[in-house]
Image (cartoon, rainbow, N blue to C red):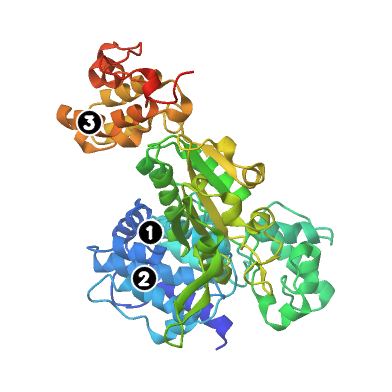
Amino acid sequence: MSDGETIYTATRRLLVAGLTESGAAFTPSDAVWTAAAAEDLLERVTEPNTAAEGQFIERLRAKLVGASSATIQLAGEMVYLHLLVPDDVGGETKAKLVETVLSADPKAVMVPPELTAALFSGFARPGPAYRAYRGWQLAWLLRFALAWRALVPATQEEALRDPWSFRRIADSFPVDRAYSQRNALLHLAFPGTFEGVVSRRHKRLIIDAFAGTGVEVSGDDDRDLIAVRAAVERRHGGRVDFYDPELMARWHPEKALSPTSEAAGLVLAEIVEEETSVLLEPTAALAAGLFVDQSWLSETVDLLREQRQLILYGPPGTGKTYLAQELARFLTAEVGGEHRLVQFHPSYAYEDFFEGFRPRRGEVSGTVAFDLEPGPLRLLADRAAQAPDVPFVLIIDEINRANLAKVFGELYFLLEYRDRSVRLQYSPTTDFRLPSNLYVIGTMNTADRSIALVDSAMRRRFAWQGLFPGEPPVADMLRRWLHAHDLPDDRADLLDALNARIAERDAAVGPSYLMNRRVGTEPGLARIWRHHILPLMEERHVGEGLDIEALYGLAALRSGTGRTATRREDAPPLEETGEPSR
């Protein structure tokens, strides 16, 4: 049996055992593909788990702790079915992923050898979205199983015989982001009817390119592809592959492969149609956990997609660093990417950030030698270059505290021109490029240094997303947090009153100072106000001799008094607090 036939035989065994008998492909005598197990697994797959680290499969395994053996094995068989598709993932890697899921059961079953063999082949390269939306793909498979379970046996038997009846079930519920999985399952179940093209965009490009060859287009992509194939094969006198360079030049000329690529065997698989990496769309669960609007998160991710560099800027306490870290974790963890944080400061330099010579003990006693060592950007860029289909995110905290021209050097150019390369000052013989799947999120405290001081070259290379009290998404952040923790919401009113008195956008106080359970009690609130917020006001009015408590204290804000700034009686003369009076 050829490798190509192996995956279809494995699929048929899986579907017959699971769909018609409610059994299992790995252990045929056990009832695994039941409605109860599918509902339990669907709930676990779609359950928010934004705090979990690691790749999707590891997170799925964590969610399976405590589940029934049937639920765990169903998860393993669904992941197995999902992994039959890609041919650019090694068989050993696929088998390890399935074993990881099954290991959630102390009595984990083993994948039969003949089924393991099918994992060493595949029929498509569905692209990074297939991995990025893996949760949606598995959820779709589970909804398909539940839709199947609701059918009478006669309808089930007909659907396993007739491809169009099978497709009707697949299209009986929303597909969401699982078009690739939907198209892949149709092909795996009926390879003689449905094309091995998992991209719906590719399907339409093929139809549009060859529709003028006597094919009457009906609007049903699957049926139209059958007609297109028949017409093209009549003209070529035999079986054709739509990903052959000659044919691909007709429907997708910019992606057509060279003869060199053909020799490498790449034309037999679907080519990635998306950008080199896919940034996940923020979920409602992520937005709820961050106490911001989902629309704002989506806009932020869109800015990152378009520009690849983004700065979150605003006054202290608006959650810039926390949001950057949580967003980076969300964008990378599920798809196997990586994120890293560095903090800039006045003494930070190019040699710290990108690469520079570091001293070490020399081979001769009493001498010093120097080695060229990579910095955090070079290290992450190298890792991103090795995995171009997943995102990597570098967070630069307090980006405006360093001399940016000194830190970035010739990398300024690469921030704007990702498709170009430059010669490096410490590696002059090396052509270096910033990978397109490397994203940068900077944070900037506007109370520390105005963004107006950032040079125009840097401003142009970054998208800017503001975080200011009184403006979305910060305006309701504290109130949402207080409500979620069942704490008095007048704390949000106090912060609003404080910022109204400050009356300066860049100097306003953010909500994170009060996002602490201690604010639930009056002593706790007073302590935070006295030791965290009033010192900020002291610093803002240093040398002015104002009575800060009378102006910004809790009692003054609650009573509405102290709106006019007054000097303390014991305040020194103004000329003693600064420059001598003239």
> Could you tell which of marks 3 and 2 lies nearer the N-terminus?
2
Label 1 to label 3, Cα distance in Å?
A: 45 Å
Characterize the local packing of mark 3: few (<14), some (14-19) or many (20 or more) Cα atoms within 10 angstroms: some
Q: Amino acid at mark 3?
A: Leu
Determine which residue is flagged by label 1. Answer: 149
**Which structural element holds mark 2?**
helix
Compared to residue 465, the image places residue 166 above or below, namely below
Determine which residue is flagged by label 3. Answer: 487
**Which structural element holds mark 1?**
helix
Q: Residue, x 50% and y 57% (percent of image)? A: 393
Q: Amino acid at mark 2?
A: Gly
Q: Residue, x 36% and y 56% (percent of image)? A: 42
Characterize the local packing of mark 1: few (<14), some (14-19) or many (20 or more) Cα atoms within 10 angstroms: some
Q: Residue, x 78% and y 56% (percent of image)? A: 216
Q: Nearer the viewer, residue 528 or 409?
A: 409
Q: Could you say which quadrant of the image residue 273 lies in?
A: bottom right
> Could you tell which of marks 1 and 3 lies nearer the N-terminus?
1
Q: Is residue 5 left or right of residue 359?
A: right
Dot 1 and dot 2 residues touching (CB under 8 Å): no
| Mark in the foreground, 1 or 2 | 2
Compared to residue 56, the image places residue 117 above or below, namely below
Quarter of the figure with the N terminus: bottom right
Q: Residue, x 37% and y 53% (percent of image)? A: 46
> Could you tell which of marks 1 and 2 lies nearer the N-terminus?
2
Mark carried by residue 76: 2
**Which structural element holds mark 3?**
loop
| Mark in the foreground, 1 or 3 | 3
| Mark in the foreground, 3 or 2 | 3
Question: Can you give x and y, in whole percent of width and height, for residue 417 in the image?
Answer: 69, 56
Question: Can you give x and y, in whole percent of width and height, for residue 62 in the image?
Answer: 30, 63
Q: Amino acid at mark 1?
A: Arg
Label 3 to label 2, Cα distance in Å?
A: 42 Å
